[in-house]
Image (cartoon, grey):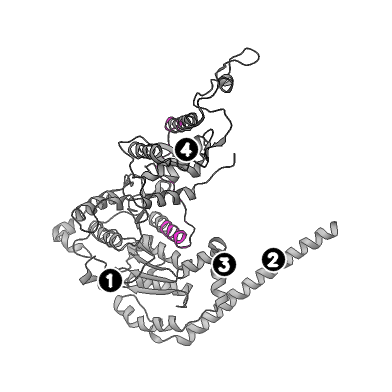
Amino acid sequence: MGRQQVDSNSSFALAACAGFAVGTALTAAAAYAISSSRQRSSTPNDTANTSSSSSYSSTTASRASRAQTTKMPSEIRSEQLSRNLLYFDEDGMKSIATARVAVIGLGGVGSHCAHLMARSGVGYLRLIDFDQVTLSSLNRHACATLEDVGIPKVAAMQRFLERICPDRRYLEIDSRIQMYTGDSAKDGNLLDGEWDLIIDAIDDVPTKANLLVHCVKKGIHVISCMGAGGKSDFTRLHVSDLRSATRDPLATKLRTCLKRRLKNDKIIKDESYLDDTDKISIIYSSEKTVVKLADFTEKQKDEGIHKFGAVDNMRIRVLPVLGTMPAIMGQSLAALALCELGKKPFSPFAGERLGKNVRNRLLQHCKRREKKFRDTLEGPAQEADTESATDNTNDNGKKRKQINPNDDWRPACVIDNKWVGPAQVDLDDVEYLMAEVWRNRCAVNGDRLGTVLELVRWDLSKPSNPSNLVLMGTKALQDFDKAYEKSGDGRDSIAPAVREKVEARLATAKVDCF
């Protein structure tokens, strides 16, 4: 037995060493292949100093040609993405590899998002930014160095990404040194074509609003980053819809701008886009801004403030930025995007933790509703069923803990194809359903203010567990109950499109083992 154990351990050690050797060999082969390719295709322009936009332009064609001719062995690319493959599986990685994604804004947030998208296997990236790398942007940019100061941000990003994957068969980088404006005459074909996702890392409110309007009208899912400046507490980051963002000045201004712009729009006739994360998802920080915009200097005031903006009608005052915040928010954008593209989406936690009193109220109402429903089918519980519940003394004559009158002590069963029994949830389940599944709003119409929210069993043929409880406001619940009285199914009160979304959310809910 001891000999078998030794042989087993030895075999495992040999296998591990062999795997390490293969990985090392592949890495060495990759370095040699890419290095040789670069040496064969290098030109004087490739080694020239590219510290300005003009010098960058002189090397663009050479670089593009080199990227097209550089070939990576397929096994090298496979090894690069092997950890991602283990996470997303083959179908997910195929979806990521064939995705078309545009990243607009390549500053602190956008650069961190773009480089992780490229590292993770996204096949086509369009990088859009008009600005250049400055010395002051080096504290937060994902890849720019002193050598990149003065060249376009998209150029610095492309040069960096080509060092990770120079083969356009696996990573096609479409760099656009251009400002997105929302004006089709100025933008040209900047956002033409089909898009799986658009990443918004713009820090100017009017331009940001233009992009979001474009995406909503075209039916393109956009993931948008709110303000990263003047903040530092990464524990206050949230993923939500645009309406839910709190204590974020950029989000507040953006909502106001969108409402004004779309007030009389012929295509977008309501404000549902503010609540729909399938249209607009955002990442924001609920931390109160701790540092204000920098004041204008005396020189700026004397010479005229309007002369110091990089572009007309855009923010002039300098925003204090701790480099870690745009990095974390940019990587969060990438995580959200990759999990959606890779068909492994997660359900972001939204909102503050519910107080115990709120959770308890929801739980008791749910229990009472389930008990009442059973009573309508088979009549109230008999005395024998409730005697132990009402007796407040034990065998020794001592008082025991008061039994909750909303608890149903009858065993679960099926009556007329309808499941009846005690509510299959506890306080933790209630918090999970409220905050993570339904995000503190009515699942039917999105109401969260001016209504009383209740947990309601969706499919009466199934138990009242987390994957079958829906959060509804007063109006939606009244319609649901009226439909049940009329047809025997409360779901008949809900529009097919809404019903489909509700059932999709229910499918993501986790059910604990009881």
In depth, the one of 46 and 458 nearer the eye is 458
Residue 87 in picture, x, y percent from top left: 55, 60
State which quadrant residue 64 falls in.
bottom left
Residue 482 seen anywhere in this rendered image of the structure: yes
Residue marked by disc 2: 16
Mark 3 neighbour density, 10 Å: few (under 14) some (14–19) many (20 or more): few
Query: Is residue 222 placed above or below 445 in the rendered structure?
Result: below
Which residue is identified by label 1?
178
Neighbour tally class for label 1: few under 14, some 14-19, many 20 plus, Cα within 10 Å: some
Residue that label 3 marks: 82
Q: Sequence order check: which comes first, mark 3 or mark 2?
A: 2
Circle 3 sits in a helix, a strand or a loop, which is it?
Answer: helix
User: Is residue 180 rendered magenta in the image?
Assistant: no
Of labels 3 and 1, earlier in sequence is 3
Q: Residues within 10 Å of mark 2 (few under 14, many from 20)?
A: few
Q: Is residue 283 visible?
A: no
Which contiguous range is marked in magenta? Answer: 331-360
Helix, strand or loop at label 1? It is loop
Of residue 25 and residue 489, the one placed in the foreground of this image is 489
The circle drawn on residue 430 is 4
Mark 2 or 4, which is nearer the eye? 4
* Mark 2: secondary structure: helix
Tag 1: amino acid:
Gln
Between the residue at mark 3 and the residue at mark 2, the CA separation in whole angstroms equals 16 Å
Instruction: Give the quarter of the image for residue 281.
Output: bottom left
> Disc 3 marks which amino acid?
Ser
Marks 4 and 3, Cα distance to the nearest angstrom?
38 Å
The reply to whether the C-beta atoms of the residues labelled 4 and 3 are less than 8 Å apart is no
**Which marked residue is nearer to the observer: mark 3 or mark 1?**
3
Q: Earlier in the sequence, mark 1 or mark 2?
A: 2
